[in-house]
Each structure stands twice: as C-alpha cells, then as structure tokens.
Image: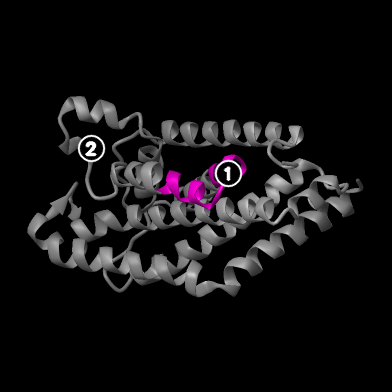
C-alpha cells in the first residue's frame, strides 16, 4: 500500500472516530464535565477547607491535576473500547481487515481517535477548573507530554478491551471494577506519603499513580514519584499494549467469529 493510501486510510478512520464522539457530545463530552464539576464542588469547596493544605497547596489546587487526568483516562479508554467493539459487533471491522490497510494503521487510527476525545475532554475540564482554582503551570512540557502519553496508553487499553469483549456487558466490567478503583487509589485526592509504609509500597503497584503524580508535577512542581520513573512506566506500558494489540490484529483474533 502506498504512503498516500496509508494516509488516506488513517485520516478516514480518525475522522470517523472524531465525528462519532462529537456527534453525540451530550453522551461523550458533557457527562465528564458535570462529574468533574461535582468533584470540585464537593471535595474542593465543601471538604477542602476542612482539610486545609496538602503538600503545601490548597486542597482544591492539589486535586485539580488528578481530576483532569482522571477525566482524560476514562474518556480515552471508553471511546476506543466502545467504538472498536461496535465495529466488531456490527461486523464492518471485517471490511477493514480484508482491505489493503495494514493492521497497524487501524490500531493507530483508533488510538488517535481516543487521544482526540481525551484531549478535548481534558481541555474542557481544565477550563472548568479555572472557575474553582488558581491553576498554575510549573512545567508546560511535562503537562502536555504526560497527558498525551496517558491518553495514548488508555486508548490502547480500551482497544484491548474492545478486542477481548464478547458482549456489551464486557465493555463496562473493566472500567467499573478495575479502572475506577485504580484511579481513585492512584493519589487523585491524597498524597501517598500520608499512608502507612505498607500501603505506600502497595500503591507503587498501581500504574495510574505514576501518571497522576507526573501530571501533578507539571502543574505544581510536586510529586510522590520520580519523574523519570513515571515516564518509563508509561512508555513501557504503551509499548507492551501496542505490541500485544498489533500481534492479535495480525492474527485476526476474534475478528472473523
């Protein structure tokens, strides 16, 4: 397939994904804004003054980075898992599999679709946060790189879910029973330094902890985790998931059933 053909295939798939989540924005873009606003109101305005400062910052300012990245994670994952499973369920994924478009273009196209939704939600939630906190940026490069890498990682994870799922119920199992607990226990609302040593050590097994702390460092300049380690963990998971998903696509795993 020529480079022009690869580009056309990629942009067509990406545009389809972007049109999909923008067309139903009441279901894809509005709910995370409402949910995050409630977090700001309840945890920031009502509970925050009772807690006081966290790591030298107002509690509201401390939780803002975590809430932004949480919205990015959830929406990047949900976009790809539901979209790719729908393609399997409606069986038009088979048309892509028999087309000249290589599997890696399909994988990158869906991943970039999840990245697009994650970035849009991240920007909107960030704008909303300005009404509740005095948002500051310590390192813009870290902020942008971490949010992009995190969105890519969970878009790939959503692709895995869409690939393995047998029905629509399987799409919701992982977000409810795995993704949400890991996100809440990843340091969104607290610093792990407040935990006993055993729980601090256990928290290090949570991959989302590294992304939340790296993102918080970009805004506030503080982190419970080494920044190079956070990048290494994120990039490592991206490479693993990309390799696994691509291998399964090349095999046509659950594509023709």
Image spot of residue 171 (x, y percent): 51, 49
On screen, residue 168 versus residue 39, left or right, reads right
Task: Classify mark 1: residues with Cα within 10 Å, few (<14), some (14-19) or many (20+).
Answer: some
In the rendered structure, which segment of residues is drawn in magenta? 157-175
Q: In the picture provided, is 101 more to the left or to the right than 216?
A: right
SS at badge 1: loop
| Circles 2 and 1 in contact, beta carbons < 8 Å | no
Residue 252 in view (yes/no): yes
What's the distance in space between the residues labelled 2 and 1, CA to CA?
A: 37 Å
Residue designated by label 1: 166
Question: In the image, is residue 12 above or below residue 6?
Answer: below
The residue at the point 44 percent across, 33 percent down is 228
Label 2: state its secondary structure. Answer: helix
Q: Identify the disc placed on residue 192.
A: 2
Residue 217, x across and y down, in percent: 35, 46
Q: Is residue 161 magenta?
A: yes
- Looking at the image, residue 183 lies above or below residue 123: above
Which residue: 17% across, 67% down?
45
Residue 187, percent across and down?
A: 28, 44
Q: Is residue 236 above or below residue 100?
A: above
* Magenta: main secondary structure: helix
N-terminal label among 2 and 1: 1
26 relative position to 191: left or right: right
Instruction: State the residue at coordinates (62%, 51%).
Output: 85
Badge nearest the viewer, 2 or 1: 1
Where, quadrant-wise, is the N terminus in this rendering? Answer: top right
Where is the C terminus found, in terms of image quarters?
top right
């Amino acid at each position: 397939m020529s480079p022009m053909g690869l580009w056309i295939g990629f942009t067509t798939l990406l545009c389809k994904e972007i049109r999909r989540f923008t067309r139903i924005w009441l279901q894809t873009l509005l709910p995370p804004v409402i949910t995050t606003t409630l977090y700001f109101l309840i945890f920031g305005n009502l509970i925050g003054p009772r807690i006081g400062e966290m790591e030298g910052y107002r509690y509201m300012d401390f939780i803002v980075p975590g809430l932004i990245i949480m919205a990015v994670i959830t929406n990047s994952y949900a976009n790809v898992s539901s979209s790719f499973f729908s393609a399997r369920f409606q069986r038009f994924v088979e048309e892509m599999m028999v087309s000249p478009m290589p599997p890696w273009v399909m994988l990158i196209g869906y991943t970039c679709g999840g990245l697009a939704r994650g970035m849009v939600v991240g920007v909107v939630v960030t704008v909303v946060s300005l009404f509740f906190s005095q948002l500051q940026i310590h390192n813009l490069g870290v902020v942008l790189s971490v949010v992009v890498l995190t969105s890519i990682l969970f878009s790939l994870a959503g692709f895995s879910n869409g690939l393995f799922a047998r029905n629509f119920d399987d799409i919701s199992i992982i977000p409810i029973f795995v993704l949400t607990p890991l996100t809440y226990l990843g340091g969104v609302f607290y610093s792990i330094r407040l935990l006993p040593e055993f729980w601090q050590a256990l928290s290090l097994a949570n991959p989302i902890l590294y992304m939340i702390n790296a993102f918080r460092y970009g805004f506030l300049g503080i982190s419970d985790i080494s920044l190079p380690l956070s990048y290494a963990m994120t990039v490592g998971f991206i490479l693993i998931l990309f390799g696994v998903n691509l291998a399964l696509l090349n095999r046509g795993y659950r594509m023709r059933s």
